Image: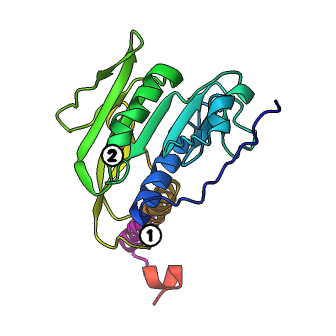
């Protein structure tokens, strides 16, 4: 029997606009954090195929966010097909909970990621209720719950990064109010900046450098004027200023 054709889009959208933004924030954050690890792939809302039986049964399993390490990062993918990836599965998975998916994410998917995928780190987060944030690390082939630190963050051992909430507004679209978003933090606790945040930071640093240079120039000109006056000269006449 020929292999079943693979479907990469079931036409089911993400649960809400906030879920979509939350997924993109995680993707952009991970891409920034992993810039020094070129052999990695970051995906979101993509089907993961792990057996031909699954493909034939149309048993679609697509993590909201995942990272796979030690893989070809340059190859374009419509989905994650394990037998085309040398048997590699996602190393880190995050599911964004909703009323319609929470039970499955906590049971069926958690069991799948633990027993079949052997995904090292699994996290769940509710974009509408930041108090719902849990994680597990695979130890001796079984998931062990992660304990949050005093900031409420969870350590992602596989990536060497923290996962924690960040309060603010994302993008120029709803939700217009500040919300809690799941973000990556460096091991030292510094936030992994998104590309737009990096650009704003660069622009602000450039503005400060320009202001400092202008202030220094003003100070130097004033010192020059003082030296001219001390020599009995008119600074305005010498410098051509009035």
Q: Is residue 4 left or right of residue 106?
A: right
What is the residue that sits farthest to the front in this orientation? 1
Task: State the SS at label 2.
Answer: helix
- Name the residue rendered at 52%, 38% in the picture: 66
Q: Nearer the viewer, mark 1 or mark 2?
A: 2
What is the residue that sits farthest to the left in this orientation? 150
User: In the rendered view of the protein, which quadrant contains the C terminus?
Assistant: bottom left
Q: Nearer the viewer, residue 239 or 197?
A: 197
- Name the residue rendered at 38%, 46% in the picture: 183
- Could you say where residue 21 lies in the image, as x and y percent from the top left? 45, 60
- In the rendered image, residue 33 lying in the magenta stretch gets the answer no
Q: Is residue 39 visible?
A: no
What is the residue that sits farthest to the bottom in this orientation? 242
Q: Is residue 60 left or right of residue 205?
A: right
- Name the residue rendered at 49%, 86% in the picture: 241
Q: Quadrant of residue 235?
A: bottom left
Q: Nearer the viewer, residue 140 or 67?
A: 140
Q: Nearer the viewer, residue 4 or 138?
A: 4
Which residue in the structure is indicated by mark 2? 102
- Could you say where residue 166 lies in the image, as x and y percent from the top left? 30, 51
Magenta span: 215-233
Q: Quadrant of residue 5?
A: top right
What is the residue that sits farthest to the right in this orientation? 2
Our reading of the magenta stretch's main secondary structure is helix
Q: Nearer the viewer, residue 218 or 8?
A: 8
Between the residue at mark 1 and the residue at mark 2, the CA separation in whole angstroms equals 66 Å
> Residue 221: which numbered mark, if any?
1
Q: Quadrant of residue 156?
A: top left
User: In the rendered view of the protein, which quadrant contains the N terminus?
Assistant: top right
Q: Is residue 73 visible?
A: yes
- On screen, 63 above or below 236? above
């Amino acid at each position: 029997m020929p292999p079943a054709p693979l479907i990469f889009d079931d036409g089911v959208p993400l649960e809400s606009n906030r879920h979509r933004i939350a997924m993109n924030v995680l993707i952009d954050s991970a891409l920034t954090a992993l810039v020094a690890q070129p052999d990695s792939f970051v995906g979101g809302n993509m089907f993961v195929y792990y057996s031909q039986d699954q493909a034939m049964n149309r048993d679609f399993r697509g993590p909201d966010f995942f990272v796979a390490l030690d893989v070809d990062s340059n190859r374009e993918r419509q989905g994650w097909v394990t037998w085309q990836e040398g048997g590699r599965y996602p190393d880190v998975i995050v599911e964004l909970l909703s009323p319609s998916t929470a039970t499955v994410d906590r049971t069926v998917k958690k069991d799948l990621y633990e027993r079949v995928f052997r995904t090292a780190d699994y996290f769940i987060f509710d974009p509408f209720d930041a108090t719902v944030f849990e994680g597990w690390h695979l130890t001796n082939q079984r998931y062990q719950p992660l304990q949050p630190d005093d900031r409420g963050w969870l350590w992602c051992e596989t990536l060497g990064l923290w996962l924690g909430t960040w309060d603010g507004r994302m993008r120029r679209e709803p939700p217009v109010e500040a919300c809690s978003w799941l973000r990556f933090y460096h091991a030292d606790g510094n936030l992994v900046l998104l590309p737009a945040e990096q650009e704003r930071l660069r622009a602000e640093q450039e503005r400060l450098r320009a202001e400092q240079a202008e202030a220094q120039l003003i100070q130097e000109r004033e010192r020059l004027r003082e030296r001219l006056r001390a020599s009995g000269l008119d600074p305005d006449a010498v410098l051509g200023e009035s």
